[in-house]
Amino acid sequence: MIYDKFIRYISVERRLSEKTVETYASTLKLFRDFLETLPEARTLETADSDNIRDWMELLMEQKCSAAYVNRSLAALRTFYKYCYATGVIATDPARSVVGPKREKRLPRFLKENEMDRLVDLLGNGENTFYNVRTRTIIYVLYLTGLRAAELISLDDNMISFVNRELKVTGKRNKQRVIPFGEELHNILSEYIAVRNDNVERKDDALFVSDKGERITYGQVRKIVKETLPLVSSLDKCTPHVLRHTFATTMLNHDANLESIKKLLGHQSLNTTEVYTHTTFEQLKKIYKEAHPRE
Protein backbone atom coordinates (compact mmCIF):
# COMPACT_ATOMS: atom_id res chain seq x y z
CA MET A 1 0.00 0.00 0.00
CA ILE A 2 1.37 3.39 -1.04
CA TYR A 3 0.56 4.95 2.34
CA ASP A 4 2.76 2.44 4.20
CA LYS A 5 5.58 2.77 1.66
CA PHE A 6 5.48 6.57 2.01
CA ILE A 7 5.63 6.45 5.82
CA ARG A 8 8.58 4.05 5.60
CA TYR A 9 10.26 6.38 3.06
CA ILE A 10 10.03 9.52 5.20
CA SER A 11 11.04 7.58 8.34
CA VAL A 12 13.98 5.59 6.96
CA GLU A 13 15.25 7.34 3.84
CA ARG A 14 14.34 10.96 4.57
CA ARG A 15 14.89 10.40 8.31
CA LEU A 16 12.32 12.98 9.28
CA SER A 17 11.71 13.45 12.99
CA GLU A 18 9.26 11.15 14.77
CA LYS A 19 6.95 14.11 15.39
CA THR A 20 6.92 15.06 11.67
CA VAL A 21 6.24 11.46 10.63
CA GLU A 22 3.31 11.29 13.07
CA THR A 23 1.93 14.58 11.72
CA TYR A 24 2.19 13.44 8.09
CA ALA A 25 0.57 10.10 8.91
CA SER A 26 -2.29 11.79 10.77
CA THR A 27 -2.83 14.28 7.93
CA LEU A 28 -3.02 11.56 5.30
CA LYS A 29 -5.53 9.59 7.38
CA LEU A 30 -7.72 12.67 7.81
CA PHE A 31 -7.59 13.41 4.08
CA ARG A 32 -8.34 9.77 3.25
CA ASP A 33 -11.37 9.86 5.57
CA PHE A 34 -12.57 13.01 3.81
CA LEU A 35 -12.20 11.39 0.37
CA GLU A 36 -14.35 8.46 1.47
CA THR A 37 -17.27 10.83 2.24
CA LEU A 38 -17.41 12.21 -1.31
CA PRO A 39 -20.36 11.18 -3.55
CA GLU A 40 -17.87 9.52 -5.89
CA ALA A 41 -15.55 8.02 -3.32
CA ARG A 42 -11.90 8.67 -4.04
CA THR A 43 -8.68 7.19 -2.71
CA LEU A 44 -5.37 8.88 -1.96
CA GLU A 45 -4.14 7.65 -5.35
CA THR A 46 -7.14 8.98 -7.34
CA ALA A 47 -7.67 12.35 -5.58
CA ASP A 48 -7.38 15.47 -7.72
CA SER A 49 -6.57 19.14 -7.08
CA ASP A 50 -10.22 20.06 -6.52
CA ASN A 51 -10.51 17.38 -3.81
CA ILE A 52 -7.53 18.91 -2.00
CA ARG A 53 -8.99 22.43 -2.30
CA ASP A 54 -12.39 21.22 -1.03
CA TRP A 55 -10.73 19.60 1.98
CA MET A 56 -8.77 22.77 2.75
CA GLU A 57 -11.99 24.76 2.52
CA LEU A 58 -13.66 22.36 4.95
CA LEU A 59 -10.77 22.79 7.41
CA MET A 60 -11.14 26.58 7.23
CA GLU A 61 -14.90 26.25 7.83
CA GLN A 62 -14.07 24.17 10.90
CA LYS A 63 -12.09 27.17 12.20
CA CYS A 64 -8.68 25.55 11.68
CA SER A 65 -5.93 28.15 11.53
CA ALA A 66 -4.22 29.08 8.26
CA ALA A 67 -0.99 27.68 9.76
CA TYR A 68 -2.65 24.30 10.38
CA VAL A 69 -4.12 24.19 6.85
CA ASN A 70 -0.74 25.05 5.33
CA ARG A 71 0.99 22.34 7.39
CA SER A 72 -1.61 19.85 6.16
CA LEU A 73 -1.04 20.96 2.57
CA ALA A 74 2.73 20.57 3.04
CA ALA A 75 2.19 16.97 4.12
CA LEU A 76 0.04 16.28 1.03
CA ARG A 77 2.62 17.93 -1.23
CA THR A 78 5.36 15.68 0.13
CA PHE A 79 3.14 12.61 -0.27
CA TYR A 80 2.09 13.36 -3.85
CA LYS A 81 5.60 14.36 -4.87
CA TYR A 82 6.69 10.90 -3.69
CA CYS A 83 3.79 9.22 -5.53
CA TYR A 84 4.66 11.05 -8.75
CA ALA A 85 8.39 10.24 -8.46
CA THR A 86 7.66 6.54 -7.93
CA GLY A 87 5.21 6.33 -10.84
CA VAL A 88 2.10 5.68 -8.73
CA ILE A 89 0.33 8.70 -10.26
CA ALA A 90 0.73 10.41 -13.64
CA THR A 91 0.21 13.98 -12.40
CA ASP A 92 0.78 15.64 -9.02
CA PRO A 93 -2.59 17.01 -7.77
CA ALA A 94 -1.03 19.05 -4.93
CA ARG A 95 1.50 20.91 -7.04
CA SER A 96 -0.84 23.67 -8.21
CA VAL A 97 -2.73 24.08 -4.91
CA VAL A 98 -2.01 27.26 -2.98
CA GLY A 99 -2.54 27.46 0.76
CA PRO A 100 -4.30 30.30 2.62
CA LYS A 101 -2.30 33.37 3.53
CA ARG A 102 -1.33 33.35 7.17
CA GLU A 103 -1.10 36.42 9.32
CA LYS A 104 2.48 37.09 10.34
CA ARG A 105 2.76 37.06 14.10
CA LEU A 106 5.78 38.35 15.90
CA PRO A 107 7.51 35.75 18.09
CA ARG A 108 6.47 35.67 21.73
CA PHE A 109 9.28 35.84 24.26
CA LEU A 110 10.01 36.52 27.92
CA LYS A 111 11.60 39.78 28.99
CA GLU A 112 15.02 39.60 30.57
CA ASN A 113 13.72 40.59 34.01
CA GLU A 114 11.10 37.81 33.75
CA MET A 115 13.81 35.26 32.95
CA ASP A 116 15.89 36.55 35.88
CA ARG A 117 12.92 36.02 38.20
CA LEU A 118 12.29 32.55 36.78
CA VAL A 119 15.92 31.56 37.26
CA ASP A 120 15.74 32.70 40.89
CA LEU A 121 12.52 30.75 41.48
CA LEU A 122 13.86 27.56 39.94
CA GLY A 123 17.06 27.84 41.95
CA ASN A 124 15.15 27.90 45.25
CA GLY A 125 13.38 24.54 44.87
CA GLU A 126 14.36 21.27 46.53
CA ASN A 127 16.88 19.17 44.63
CA THR A 128 14.47 16.38 43.73
CA PHE A 129 14.91 14.66 40.36
CA TYR A 130 11.77 16.35 39.01
CA ASN A 131 12.82 19.84 40.14
CA VAL A 132 16.40 19.51 38.90
CA ARG A 133 15.20 18.15 35.55
CA THR A 134 12.69 21.00 35.17
CA ARG A 135 15.35 23.59 35.99
CA THR A 136 17.84 22.02 33.57
CA ILE A 137 15.34 21.80 30.69
CA ILE A 138 14.36 25.46 31.10
CA TYR A 139 18.02 26.50 31.26
CA VAL A 140 19.03 24.46 28.21
CA LEU A 141 16.17 25.83 26.09
CA TYR A 142 16.89 29.41 27.20
CA LEU A 143 20.71 29.31 27.03
CA THR A 144 21.03 27.40 23.74
CA GLY A 145 17.87 28.19 21.73
CA LEU A 146 17.28 24.51 20.97
CA ARG A 147 14.02 23.32 19.46
CA ALA A 148 12.06 20.97 21.72
CA ALA A 149 12.70 18.04 19.34
CA GLU A 150 16.44 18.76 19.46
CA LEU A 151 16.43 18.81 23.26
CA ILE A 152 14.54 15.51 23.39
CA SER A 153 17.01 13.84 20.99
CA LEU A 154 20.07 14.79 23.09
CA ASP A 155 22.20 11.92 24.35
CA ASP A 156 24.90 12.18 27.01
CA ASN A 157 27.64 11.74 24.41
CA MET A 158 26.46 14.85 22.56
CA ILE A 159 27.77 17.00 25.41
CA SER A 160 31.45 17.88 25.65
CA PHE A 161 32.15 19.27 29.11
CA VAL A 162 35.81 19.76 28.16
CA ASN A 163 35.03 21.93 25.12
CA ARG A 164 31.75 23.17 26.60
CA GLU A 165 29.65 22.48 23.53
CA LEU A 166 26.54 20.59 22.46
CA LYS A 167 26.39 18.60 19.23
CA VAL A 168 22.84 18.93 17.94
CA THR A 169 20.97 17.24 15.10
CA GLY A 170 18.37 19.69 13.81
CA LYS A 171 15.82 19.78 11.02
CA ARG A 172 16.59 17.66 7.97
CA ASN A 173 19.25 15.93 10.10
CA LYS A 174 21.62 18.89 9.81
CA GLN A 175 24.18 18.95 12.60
CA ARG A 176 25.52 22.00 14.39
CA VAL A 177 27.62 22.73 17.44
CA ILE A 178 26.42 25.10 20.15
CA PRO A 179 28.83 26.48 22.76
CA PHE A 180 27.81 26.95 26.38
CA GLY A 181 29.27 28.66 29.42
CA GLU A 182 30.11 27.82 33.01
CA GLU A 183 26.53 28.30 34.26
CA LEU A 184 25.08 25.64 31.97
CA HIS A 185 28.13 23.43 32.57
CA ASN A 186 27.32 23.37 36.29
CA ILE A 187 23.57 22.89 35.78
CA LEU A 188 24.05 19.96 33.38
CA SER A 189 26.62 18.35 35.69
CA GLU A 190 24.23 18.60 38.65
CA TYR A 191 21.32 17.18 36.64
CA ILE A 192 23.31 14.19 35.38
CA ALA A 193 24.48 13.40 38.93
CA VAL A 194 20.94 13.61 40.35
CA ARG A 195 19.54 11.60 37.42
CA ASN A 196 22.11 8.83 37.83
CA ASP A 197 21.38 8.60 41.57
CA ASN A 198 17.60 8.42 41.12
CA VAL A 199 16.78 6.83 37.77
CA GLU A 200 17.85 3.72 35.90
CA ARG A 201 18.09 4.78 32.26
CA LYS A 202 16.84 2.50 29.48
CA ASP A 203 18.94 4.17 26.75
CA ASP A 204 21.53 6.94 26.27
CA ALA A 205 19.03 9.83 26.44
CA LEU A 206 20.11 12.90 28.40
CA PHE A 207 16.61 13.81 29.54
CA VAL A 208 14.52 10.92 30.80
CA SER A 209 11.27 10.30 32.66
CA ASP A 210 11.24 8.90 36.18
CA LYS A 211 10.92 5.47 34.51
CA GLY A 212 14.20 5.97 32.67
CA GLU A 213 12.66 6.39 29.21
CA ARG A 214 13.55 9.25 26.85
CA ILE A 215 11.38 12.24 27.70
CA THR A 216 8.55 12.99 25.25
CA TYR A 217 7.48 16.23 23.59
CA GLY A 218 4.29 16.18 25.66
CA GLN A 219 6.32 16.03 28.88
CA VAL A 220 8.61 18.89 27.81
CA ARG A 221 5.63 20.98 26.77
CA LYS A 222 3.93 20.31 30.13
CA ILE A 223 7.06 21.37 32.05
CA VAL A 224 7.28 24.64 30.14
CA LYS A 225 3.53 25.28 30.31
CA GLU A 226 3.58 24.90 34.11
CA THR A 227 6.78 26.91 34.62
CA LEU A 228 6.63 30.04 32.45
CA PRO A 229 3.31 31.36 33.88
CA LEU A 230 5.13 31.77 37.22
CA VAL A 231 6.67 34.95 35.80
CA SER A 232 4.82 35.72 32.56
CA SER A 233 1.27 36.45 31.44
CA LEU A 234 1.82 35.20 27.87
CA ASP A 235 -1.30 33.48 26.58
CA LYS A 236 0.72 30.67 25.01
CA CYS A 237 3.66 29.20 26.91
CA THR A 238 5.42 26.64 24.70
CA PRO A 239 9.05 25.45 24.44
CA HIS A 240 9.42 27.66 21.36
CA VAL A 241 8.88 30.75 23.53
CA LEU A 242 12.25 30.04 25.16
CA ARG A 243 13.88 29.66 21.73
CA HIS A 244 12.46 33.07 20.80
CA THR A 245 13.67 34.44 24.14
CA PHE A 246 17.20 33.16 23.46
CA ALA A 247 17.31 34.78 20.01
CA THR A 248 15.85 38.09 21.18
CA THR A 249 18.24 38.26 24.15
CA MET A 250 21.23 37.58 21.88
CA LEU A 251 20.12 40.31 19.48
CA ASN A 252 19.54 42.79 22.29
CA HIS A 253 23.09 42.15 23.47
CA ASP A 254 24.61 42.96 20.08
CA ALA A 255 25.01 39.48 18.58
CA ASN A 256 24.94 39.70 14.78
CA LEU A 257 22.18 38.03 12.78
CA GLU A 258 24.49 35.61 10.99
CA SER A 259 25.75 34.21 14.31
CA ILE A 260 22.19 33.88 15.67
CA LYS A 261 21.16 32.14 12.43
CA LYS A 262 23.92 29.54 12.87
CA LEU A 263 23.13 28.98 16.55
CA LEU A 264 19.41 28.50 15.83
CA GLY A 265 20.05 26.25 12.84
CA HIS A 266 18.03 28.42 10.45
CA GLN A 267 18.48 27.74 6.75
CA SER A 268 17.70 31.30 5.70
CA LEU A 269 18.65 34.64 7.24
CA ASN A 270 15.08 35.79 6.45
CA THR A 271 13.81 33.46 9.17
CA THR A 272 16.19 34.99 11.71
CA GLU A 273 15.35 38.57 10.71
CA VAL A 274 11.90 38.28 12.31
CA TYR A 275 13.66 38.94 15.64
CA THR A 276 14.75 42.38 14.45
CA HIS A 277 11.06 43.25 14.06
CA THR A 278 10.38 41.88 17.53
CA THR A 279 13.01 44.03 19.20
CA PHE A 280 11.85 47.08 17.26
CA GLU A 281 8.30 46.51 18.47
CA GLN A 282 9.65 46.35 22.01
CA LEU A 283 11.54 49.58 21.40
CA LYS A 284 8.39 51.33 20.22
CA LYS A 285 6.49 50.09 23.27
CA ILE A 286 9.20 51.29 25.66
CA TYR A 287 9.31 54.67 23.89
CA LYS A 288 5.55 55.05 24.17
CA GLU A 289 5.57 54.15 27.87
CA ALA A 290 8.61 56.22 28.83
CA HIS A 291 8.62 59.35 26.69
CA PRO A 292 7.03 62.32 28.51
CA ARG A 293 5.29 63.58 25.36
CA GLU A 294 3.57 60.28 24.62
Image (cartoon, rainbow, N blue to C red):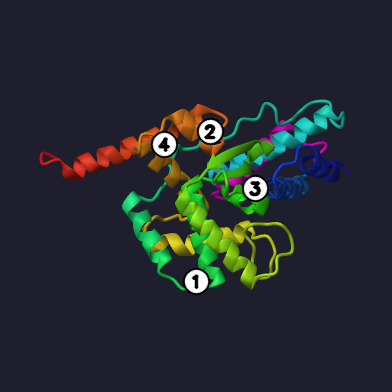
> Marks 3 and 2, how far apart in space?
18 Å
Q: Position of residue 109 (x, y in %)?
A: 41, 48
**Disc with the residue nearer the chain's start (2 vs 4):** 2
The one nearer the camera, 34 or 255, is 255
Q: Position of residue 80 (x, y in %)?
A: 76, 33
Q: Quadrant of the C terminus?
A: top left
Mark 1 burial class by Cα count in 10 Å: few <14, some 14-19, many 20+: some
> Marks 2 and 4, how far apart in space?
14 Å
**Disc with the residue nearer the chain's start (3 vs 1):** 1
Left or right side of 207 for 77? right
Name the residue type under label 2: Lys
Mark 3 burial class by Cα count in 10 Å: few <14, some 14-19, many 20+: some
Q: Which mark, residue 158?
A: 3
Secondary structure under badge 4?
helix
Q: Which residues are magenta?
A: 43-64
Which residue lies at the image location 61% right of the left edge and 56% below the top edge?
Answer: 217
Name the residue type under label 3: Met
